[in-house]
Amino acid sequence: MKVGDLVRPKYKYSDNESGLGLIVKVEEGFYAQQAIDDLYDRLTIHWAHGETTKEPCAYVEKLDKQ
């Protein structure tokens, strides 16, 4: 995943969540010293409801362009 990708959580915790976010920063290999793929990246995501959080890459899925 890269900056500018639109994402949503793989699993929603509440039906009240909009669940859409924009990646604003990628910290490659944050969770492992020698990451083989992007599963170990930490993403800074700005969510549609106004909050910005830091999440592991495995927490979200990228929305495809339609």
Image (spheres, helix red, strand yellow):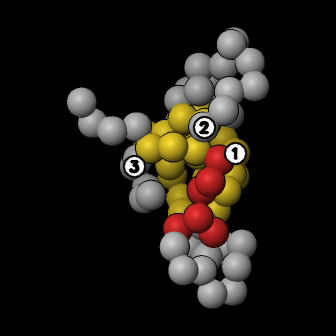
Residue at screen point 60% across, 37% down: 10
- Mark 2–mark 3 contact, CB under 8 Å? no
Q: Residue 27 carries which label?
A: none
> Nearer the N terminus, badge 2 or badge 3?
3
Provide the residue designation for mark 3: 4
Q: Is residue 22 visible?
A: no
**Residue 20 as seen in the image, left or right of residue 34:** left
How far apart are the two marked residues, 2 and 3, measured between alpha carbons? 18 Å
Query: What number is the disc on residue 10?
Result: 2
Q: Name the residue under label 1.
A: 53
- Say which of 56 and 3 sits in front: 56
Inspect the image, locate mark 2, and give the three-letter code of the amino acid beneath it. Answer: Lys
Query: Camera-side residue: 1 or 51?
Result: 1
Residue 28: quarter of image: bottom right
Q: How far, Cα to Cα, is label 1 from label 3?
A: 15 Å
Q: Earlier in the sequence, mark 1 or mark 2?
A: 2
Of helix, strand and loop, which one carries label 3?
Answer: loop
Q: Which of marks 1 and 3 is nearer the N terminus?
A: 3
Q: Where is residue 41 in the image (x, y as percent from the top left)?
A: 60, 66
Q: Please, what secondary structure does the residue beneath circle 1 have?
A: strand
